[in-house]
Image: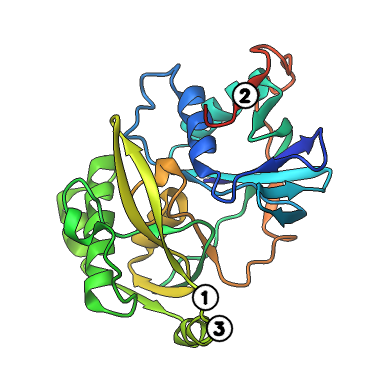
Amino acid sequence: MRVRIIFVVKNKGGYVPFYHQSLLAQLAESLLAGNRNFSSESEYSFSGLKGQTKVSKNGLHFYSSRATLVFSSHNPALIDFFLQNLFERGEFEVGTLQLVPESVERELPPLFRDELKCVCISPIVAVDPISNDFYAKKFITPDSDTFSDFLYESTMIRMEKSGRYTADQIASFYKFQVVPDKAYLQRIKEGEKKFARIYPIVENGNRYEVRGYTFPFALYSAPEVQQFVFECGLGYFTQKGFGMIDMTNADLTRRTEPYVLEKQAVSMNGYGKQNLNGH
């Protein structure tokens, strides 16, 4: 299940770092920490904050009255627990941006078939630096079998860990291929822009560097696999803000419905203000 959380922006002009998912990851971890069923191994993913922004040397300045965050998991109970604690906590800061949760919408799920055309909402990390330091920062051509093989391996490992699929089901999910939009990659190359960058990661107190990829692609796989990556993200470190995907040309006005969270009317300042500024 995927939900869109709408926040009121209290200080128009406030800014967040260009890549602020690490700050949002801190928020998610703190909100889920109160329930032992939702450990760091829980499968969820989230986007960056979206709104009307302008770029400066400090980052992204928000000039809209609202900002939106997509949060997703295959576990509805995890989403409810996250939302409940978010609304109880009330106002908090990401960078210098002051946000107050206002409402929630549920995204209507797409129809999963053999092909899912995707765009990256956040960069995809194809290689785990803990188990494969050599390939962690190395550029891998997205249209190569190696790239698809790494993503297939990570997806099967995560699906198995989720406990939602039998060994026979996992074995049946052998069809898996990521096919990038070659026209997009060519335009990026001609414009001398980048779709793959190095990002820092802190895992269990250790600092790593990984390469994250952002480009449109088609995923050919079983519908169950498509649903898993749509809800839980693709690749590694989804809990740290990597690997969230969406459908190409998604109709944002027709794909949601109001999401009613029980006890949502609790005090918006139950935990006081929290500052997420990276310190």
**Image coords of residue 45 (percent x, y):** 46, 45
Vertical position of residue 95 compared to residue 184: above or below? above
- Label whose residue precedes the other's in the sequence (3 or 2): 3
Q: Nearer the viewer, residue 92 or 36?
A: 92
**Left or right of 13 in this view: 56:** left
Residue 113 makes an appearance in the image: yes
The disc placed on residue 191 is 3
Could you tell me the amino acid type at mark 1? Answer: Lys
- Circle 3 sits in a helix, a strand or a loop, which is it? loop
Say which residue label 2 marks. Answer: 275
Could you tell me the amino acid type at mark 2? Answer: Asn
**Image coords of residue 44 (percent x, y):** 43, 42
- Circle 2 sits in a helix, a strand or a loop, which is it? strand
- Label whose residue precedes the other's in the sequence (1 or 2): 1
State which quadrant residue 88 falls in: top right
Say which residue label 1 marks. Answer: 193
